[in-house]
Image (cartoon, helix red, strand yellow):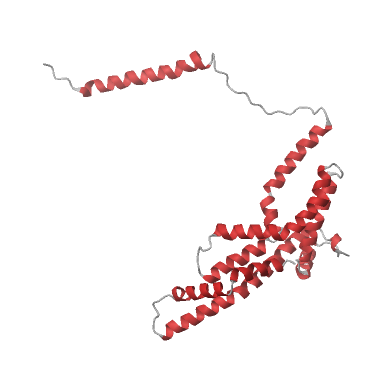
Amino acid sequence: MENRTPGKNGPKVIQVVLISVACLVVLLPTAGWGQDAAAPFFSIGLQQAEQPQQVSVVLQIFLLLTVLSIAPAILIMLTAFTRIAIVLAVLRQAMGTQTMPPSQVILGLALFLTFFVMAPVWNTVNQEALQPFLDNKISQQQALEKALEPIRAFMFKHTREKDLSLLVNISKTPRPKNTADIPTTVLIPSFIISELKTAFQIAFMLYVPFLVIDMVVASVLLSMGMMMLPPVMISLPFKLMLFVLADGWYLIVGSLVKSFN
C-alpha cells in the first residue's frame, strides 16, 4: 500500500479553488448582472423653474432645515432653560449624591419646566404669527417679526440694564431711545449673561445649607479623632433628611418657576 501524504496535494487544491473563484468574479458581472438586473439611477441637477413659486418653496425648505439645525441653541439660549439647568445641576453637586438624580432626569425636568415657563410666550407666537401665516393672512417676513416680538419682550423682562449697556457699548451701537432700537444681536448675549448671574445667585443660596452640614460633620469627626473617615459618608444622610423634611423639590421648583413671573 502507498503512503499518501495530504500535505503534498493541499497547495494544488488551494490553487484550483482560487482560480475558480477568480473566474466566477470575472464572468458573473458580464453574464448575469449586465443582462437582467437594472441598477438604480440617481442624479442631481439644476433646471429652469417654470413658476416663481417653485423657487420660493425650495428656499423655504432650506430655511426650515437651517432653523432645525439651530433649534437646540435657540431652545437653550433664548428661554428659561439655562437658569433651570444650572440650578438643578448645582443642587445635585451640593447634596453630594454624585450621579443621583441622573443627568437625563435633570435635563428632562429642566426641559419640561422650560416648556411650562415659556408656554405663554409660545402661545402668543402661535396666535399672532404662526396661524396667520398658515392662513396666508401675513407674509413670511411679517410672521418672523411678529414671532420675535414676544420673545424679545421675555428677554427684556429678565435682562439686567447693566448687561444690556455693556453689550451696547461693545457693539458701538448708537444710544437707543427705547427697547425697539436695541438689536436682537445685542439683546441675546445680554440675556444669556443675566441668566447666568441669576442662576449662580440662586445656586449659591442653595449651596449654603449643605455646606454648613458638611462643616459641622467634619468638625465633629475631627474632634472625635476619626480623621480617616470621609465626612461625606456621614453628612450625606443628614443632607438627604434635611432636603426631604423641607420638601426641597417643591420649594426649588416653585422658586424657579416664580422667578420668571
The percent position of residue 111, horizontal first and vertical second, equals 64, 57
- Residue 12's x, y, as percent? 28, 19
Image quadrant of residue 43? Answer: top right
Q: Which of 158 and 116 is in front in this view?
A: 116
Furthest toward the bottom, the residue is 223
Q: Could you tell me which quadrant the N terminus lies in?
A: top left
Quadrant where the C terminus sits is bottom right
Compared to residue 244, the image places residue 69 above or below, namely: above
The image shows residue 66, relative to residue 80, as above or below, that is above
Give the residue at x 72% y 47%: 67
Q: Residue furthest right?
A: 177
**How far from the left and from the top, in percent, is residue 131?**
81, 46
Q: Residue at coordinates 69% horizontally, 69% vertically from top-left?
A: 198
- Residue in front for this viewpoint, 256 or 44: 256
- Residue at the (57%, 77%) spot, across then down: 209
Could you say where residue 259 lies in the image, as x and y percent from the top left? Answer: 71, 69
* Foreground of the two, 143 or 62: 143
The quadrant in which residue 89 appears is bottom right
